[in-house]
Amino acid sequence: MAKRALITGITGQDGSYLAEFLLSQGYDVYGLVRRTSTINFSRIHHIQDRVTLISGDMLDQTSLMSALEQSEAEEVYNLAAQSFVQTSWSQPVFTGDVTALGVTRLLDAIRKVNPRIRFYQASSSEMFGKVREVPQRETTPFYPRSPYGVAKVYGHWITVNYRESYGLHATSGILFNHESPRRGLEFVTRKVTHAVARIKLGLDEYVYLGNLDSRRDWGFAGDYVRAMWLMLQQDEPDDYVISTGETHSVQELVEVAFSHAGLDWQAHVRQDERFMRPAEVDLLVGDSSKAGHVLGWEPQVHFRELIQMMVDADMQVVQEMIEQGRIDVNHAG
Ligand code: NDP
Ligand code: GDR
């Protein structure tokens, strides 16, 4: 019999790659989707006939229990979150409700419906925030710098707590930034690569950014979902850092993206206070040697290749928009 997995956040960047990966492994894949007034299945459109979507919300405990019962899942991947750091300052309570308490709702539903379920929690390098150690590893203390980071620390510790309190197979993957052509337009990599395409194709002249000095450890989402699956195949639940071990500044990202399109970034990048954060995470770089030893996981795609892949994909997206007369001049900021 095929294994059954339930993914919360299946309509997001990671959810779509994870669903593809699990299908390729022969899984029956179920996805939790929340009710919206317009359909937002663009990332899973190509696999929609191969996955089963179940209506539910991380804010609604009853719907989570129903999703577990309906799917009879053996593995649950909790990817659902209010995941945009900037928004977490304007919606701190909502972010806490979904991104922190949502984890408890799901873990408690698992405990009641089927405590043998293997659970993956999407923890984040944002938990390291004002870093206490370089590079950051599983034992590095947390110091979150945003309501989102604080919510993720809660989600991490409640996962550890349910593992220790109830013996659940509950694992926390502490993933550093990972990107792809499916990244939301508000995140800095995709904002830049999409802007490069629009500038190159004559639709815009400038892109407005915040802090160019912050440094991130950027990997490819397709590589990172494989690590999530590997974690749940281990006999014992544990915590793992997943990262590339390289760090680059936002300015380097900008330079690589613009130069790939043959453009001079200084002519097109403007700084704008609106995109500065009340508290910044200055430097992230992970040490994923534990994942290397235990899971046999290594990243395949590195920074320059990743950004170039995203620029190429956005050139195609914007070109098609132009050809189809669908130019949206108010693209995400
Ligand atoms: P996205 O923002 O692309 O996707 C988030 C998903 O969560 C969407 O499917 C969204 O649904 C869903 N969601 C949000 N709120 C609710 C809710 N109340 N009920 C049900 N579903 C909800 O995030 P990513 O794919 O990039 O990230 C996946 C997870 O990994 C997140 O938890 C994120 O915080 C975490 N993470 C991400 C990293 C990264 O670099 N990408 C790094 C470390 C951790 P909808 O489509 O309806 O909005
Ligand atoms: P991050 O990703 O906050 O690391 O969280 P984001 O791409 O939003 O920011 C990265 C860095 O770029 C700086 N920056 C800008 N960011 C955005 N979004 N827009 C801008 O215009 C801009 N200019 C500069 C930011 O200040 C920051 O330093 C992501 C999310 O996916 C989280 O859900 C996840 O947990 C972490 O990565 C790991």
Image (cartoon, rainbow, N blue to C red):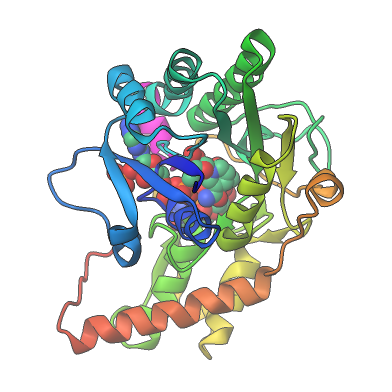
Percent across and percent down for residue 128 are 69, 34
Percent across and percent down for residue 121 are 56, 33
* Span highlighted in magenta in the image: 83-93
- Residue at the limit of the structure toward the front, as seen here: 1
From the viewer's perspective, tell me whether residue 16 is left or right of residue 160: left
Which residue lies at the image location 65% right of the left edge and 69% below the top edge? 252
Q: In which quarter of the image is residue 41?
A: bottom left
Q: Can residue 289 be seen in this view?
A: yes
Q: Does the magenta stretch include residue 204?
A: no
Q: In the image, is residue 173 above or below residue 331?
A: above
Give the quadrant of the C terminus. bottom left
Classify the position of ligand 1 by quadrant: top left, top right, bottom left or bottom right: top left
Q: In the image, is residue 237 above or below residue 160?
A: below
Which residue lies at the image location 40% right of the left edge and 72% below the top edge? 194
Q: In the image, is residue 279 above or below residue 260?
A: above
Q: Is residue 85 visible?
A: no
Percent across and percent down for residue 288 are 79, 48
Q: Is residue 91 magenta?
A: yes
Which residue lies at the image location 59% right of the left edge and 40% below the top edge? 280
Q: In the image, is residue 118 above or below residue 270?
A: above
Percent across and percent down for residue 5 are 47, 42
